[in-house]
Structures are given as C-alpha cells and as structure tokens.
Image (tube, rainbow, N blue to C red):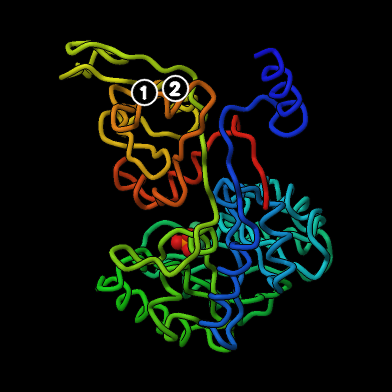
Amino acid sequence: MDSDILASRTRIATTAQGATGYLTIDLAALGRNYRKLVSMLGPVRAGAVVKADAYGLGAERVARTLYGEGCRHFFVAQFVEAVRLRPALAQDAQVFVLNGLQPGNEIACAEMGIVPVLNSLAQWRQWSAAARILKRCLPAVLQFDTGMSRLGFPREERAELAAALRDGTNVEILFIMSHLASADDMDSEQNGEQFAEMSRIADEFPGFDISFANSGGVFLGEAYYGVLARPGIALYGGAPNAGEKNPMEPVVSLDVAVVQTRSVPAGAKVGYGGAHVTQRETRLATIAAGYADGLPRSLSDCGAVYFKGIRLPIVGRVSMDSATVDISALPEGALTFGSLVEVLGRHQTLEDIARDAGTISYEILTGLGDRYHRQYR
Ligand SMILES: *Cc1c(COP(=O)(O)O)cnc(C)c1O
C-alpha cells in the first residue's frame, strides 16, 4: 500500500500535476483532418478558424500544427485572440479578426500586422482613418451579410461602400467574404438563398477573391468554395453536417477520475435537490468533473460516461465539480477510487454528448474547462 502511494506520487509529480481529468488532443488527427479538407478543396486554399482558443483545444498548438500542414490563413473572432496568436506564427501566416475591431484598436492592430475583417461602414471609416494617420496602405477583408443578420455589411451600406472603393482608398482589400447560417443542414433552403445573395455581391464588387464556406460549406460543394475556405469544427473532429455520417477523425478524448464509490439501498436520494431516487440497490461512483469542467448541467439524469465500453448513466444533477454515475452494470470492484472513466473517446463522440446535453459539439468543445491535464499527442 505504502509503495502504491509512493508510486502514484511520483507519477503525479512527473506527468499530470495532480489533475483528475485528462484531455488528450491528437495533433496528428488534426493534421489528417486538415489534409482531408485540403484534398476535397483541390486548388482552393484551406484556412483555419482558431477562435475561442481553437474551440478550446489550444490556439497556439493547433495553429502551429496547421501551419506545418501548409495553412497560412488563421481566423480568430476577437482582437485579443489575434494579439496572443500573432507572435506565435511565422510572418507569412496571416491572422484575421472576424468581429473586426472595437474603435481605438486600429493603430495597435496595424502595427502588429493583424488583418481586421471590416463588417460595416463604421469599421471601414475607422480603418481608413488609421491608414491615413499611419500614411500607408492597410490590408483588410470585407465581410458581407448574405442573410444571417449577424456580422457584415448590410445591403443598405453596399452602395456607399462601392462608391468609397471607386473613389480610391488606402485600404487594400485582400478578399471579400460571407458566412453561411445553415451549412450544417445540407437540405436547408437558406444555403441557396445566401449563395444567390453572394453572387449579387460578387457582381457589385467585381474583381475580388471570395471566401465563403465554413466546415459545413466545404461539404455543400464547389459552388460554395470561393478561393479560401474557413473550416473550424471539422478540423477538431466535429461533424460538419448534422444527420450525416461524420467523415472527420476524432481529435479530442477526455478521461475523468473516480473520486469515490458507494452502494446505496433502494430509495436513496442522489445529488442536489434529491432529484434522483434509486429504484433498487445501486452502486454509484462520483467522478471528478462537473459543469465547471464543461459537463453541461443538462446531462443531469440523461447523459453517460463509459468504462471499458460499458455505459454508466449519469444519475442525479451534475454538480459544479463532480457528477455521479450508476456503475451497477459493472462487476463489483471493477471500477474503484482512482479509475478513469471515458467522457469522450471511442464509445462516446462529441456528437453523442452534445445530443444528450441538448446542445452542439461546438459548445461542448469550447466549454471544456482548464482543470484538466492537457496532453498533446
Ligand atoms: C466560426 C466561423 C467559421 C467556422 O465555422 P465552422 O462551422 O466551425 O466550420 C467560419 N467563418 C466564420 C465567419 C465563423 O464565425
């Protein structure tokens, strides 16, 4: 027993820093997912969307890996993300800020060599002013709203923008872009509607390269490609199209440690609110991850984890730092204090857990907390 404790103490000091959950990020699988998209896209370039810390996987590690695969266009959502990522990448990589800049960030952005996506005349004017102050031409991307009503020049601003471009400008437009709202649904009519609107925009703003497709868009077909695709979720192993077989390789697995096991009689209350009452004698395990670690509270009494391929249902409410699972399906003693259960892996995909939680893979990935020990393979 003493030697066990000693052995585990050595292990913790060297590898896992005392963490009770292990998030494994397979950078080789990430690379293969990128190459798969590249081969589908043919001559069209594949950028990478690495916003929200590369959907929770670590923007720097992810971006460097993809740079190694030939990716040169990296998209983040917010300027602060670009400020962190820019120095980690070689000069021939470009970092784009999808939300554009808040007023006042223009000079810092220009000086760091970060490229804003301009979404409105207001952002356009601010960026043009920065170019005048710095007395040089500044690069930018123009985003148009084609029917999502979220970001991008609205139709009403297009005429004034076109006039400003005709008058000559010290802003160099690298390409124009738009974003698909329903590309995950291959049958959605909105895809065709947005495509038609993008075609009208291409006529109004001739001569510019176009970037259109996100992950789902890559699978909608060539018409949606433009010259540069912007996949995110597919790189990280999420399904690009809902309801279709997922062609991407999983990148993330998550194993969480058991803190305690117990047997309770029929009629025992489990977890906050006593919301679950056992129907029979039940063996339970408490695992060291809760909603603060990204196990959504909506998995209460409906999600599961796995041990050696056996499904262990979550019983009662998911707590902040732990959740309780029913281990009665396992032989007694099979799972003990210190065992690891699979939250994401061979038996439970991102889509499985997202469906049980009533959400999408994106929210599961970006919610994975920072208390896990992250290991990159
Ligand atoms: C998030 C985002 C993407 C990537 O979308 P996925 O569905 O993850 O591929 C592409 N373009 C824009 C503008 C985005 O906001």
Q: Position of residue 182 (x, y in %)?
A: 33, 65
Residue 98 placement, left or right of 217: right
Q: Position of residue 115 (x, y in %)?
A: 69, 63
Residue 152, visible in the rendered structure? no
> Which one is in front in this view, the residue at disc 2 or the one at disc 1?
1
Q: Which SS class for mark 2?
A: loop
Q: Is residue 334 above or below residue 231?
A: above
Q: Badge 1: how crowded within 10 Å, few (<14), some, or many (20+)?
A: many
Which amino acid type is marked by label 1?
Thr
Of residue 11 and residue 46, the one placed in the foreground of this image is 11
What residue do we see at 44% from left, 50% from top? 362
What residue do we see at 73% from left, 34% from top? 15
Q: Quadrant of residue 276?
A: top left
Q: Position of residue 120 (x, y in %)?
A: 52, 61
Looking at the rendering, in which quadrant would you find the N terminus?
top right
Q: Position of residue 293 (x, y in %)?
A: 50, 31
Q: In the image, which disc is placed on residue 324?
A: 1
Does label 2 point to a residue whose CB lies under 8 Å from ligand 1? no
Does label 1 point to a residue whose CB lies under 8 Å from ligand 1? no
Whole-number angstrom distance, CA of label 2 to CA of label 1: 7 Å
Q: Is residue 59 above or below residue 229?
A: above
Q: In the image, which disc is placed on residue 165?
A: none
Residue 258, visible in the rendered structure? yes
Q: Badge 2: how crowded within 10 Å, few (<14), some, or many (20+)?
A: many
What residue do we see at 47% from left, 73% from top? 213
Residue 179 placement, left or right of 325: right
Residue holding disc 2? 322
